Amino acid sequence: MSECRMPSVSIRCLGGFRIEVDGSGVDCAAARPRTVSLLRLLAVHAGAAVHRDVLLEALWPGLAPEPGRRNLHVTLSRARRLLAGAGAGATLIRDGAAYALWSTGNDVREFDRITAPTLRGAPAELGTLRRTLALYRGDLLPEEGPAEWVVGERYRLRTAAARLCALVAAAELRQGRIPAAVAVAERGLELDAYEDAAWRVLLAARRESGDVAAATRVRARYTRLLNGS
């Protein structure tokens, strides 16, 4: 009797949503928008079970409980069928009144695994930090727009990425890689213009390069930001 094998399921949420099963993308184009939103919401929680009431409030806010539960049941069935068509129907798991989307890889989970302790001061190799920063391809689930359930988490991850940029830029500067330090610091400021550590690294890199004019421009940009102009 052959042994049942769970597929390799990779989920990407940063910079855009994508599910891959054994290396092939799941085609969500024909699925109903609410079905895909359900998968995205579960994906953000990276394998943790999400209670039915949380799903109802996020996807059908203000709807009475009974029709809301019916909608959820139908949407879950559609999501399972979508995943089953890609050979991953068993990855949508029920745990009592909660649901989870199982995966072998999730960019949000991996980003947090390294970033959270690093931002608390835990040491990490520069190579590890570079690879972690590369996971941040863009904002969390841009397809969901200003949906309330994603806005707070999107802001948290964007802020964390900006802080990580500052740390990576500082490490690059310490190793004498000035162009790399400048590029990563600028990226951090694109994510969060008020990330002071990124401004400090950028200014230090410009000074260390001997480019007095560039350093002056950086200081002027920072001053204008602080003055609100």
Image (cartoon, grey):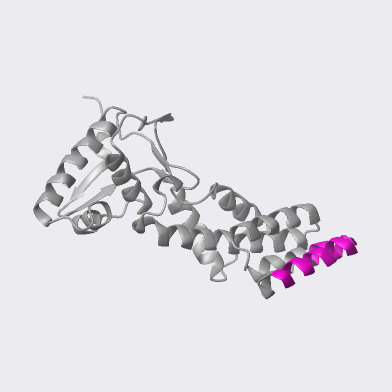
Res 4 seen here? no
Q: Is residue 132 left or right of residue 55?
A: right
Report the quarter where the N terminus lies: top left
In terms of depth relative to the viewer, which is nearer, 114 or 32?
A: 32
Q: Is residue 95 left or right of residue 226?
A: left
Res 68 seen here? yes
Asked if the stretch drawn in magenta spans residue 13, the answer is: no
Q: Residue furthest top?
A: 1
Q: Quadrant of residue 122?
A: bottom right
Q: Residue furthest bottom?
A: 227
Q: Which residue is found at the position 67% from the left and 69% from the top? A: 197
Asked if the stretch drawn in magenta spans residue 220, the answer is: yes
Q: Position of residue 26 (x, y in %)?
A: 37, 31
Q: Which residue is found at the position 39% from the left and 43% from the top? A: 104
Q: Quadrant of residue 12?
A: top left
Magenta-drawn stretch, dominant element (helix, strand or loop) = helix
Q: Position of residue 170 (x, y in %)?
A: 71, 64
Report the quarter where the C terminus lies: bottom right
In terms of depth relative to the viewer, which is nearer, 114 or 31?
A: 31
Q: Which residue is found at the position 58% from the left and 52% from the top? A: 133
Q: Is residue 58 left or right of residue 211?
A: left
Q: Position of residue 2 (x, y in %)?
A: 24, 25
Q: Position of residue 94 (x, y in %)?
A: 19, 48
Q: Residue furthest front?
A: 229
Q: Is residue 29 above or below residue 96?
A: above
Task: Count every numbered label the image shows and give the total.
Answer: 0
Q: Which residues are magenta?
A: 204-224
Q: Is residue 71 left or right of residue 89?
A: left
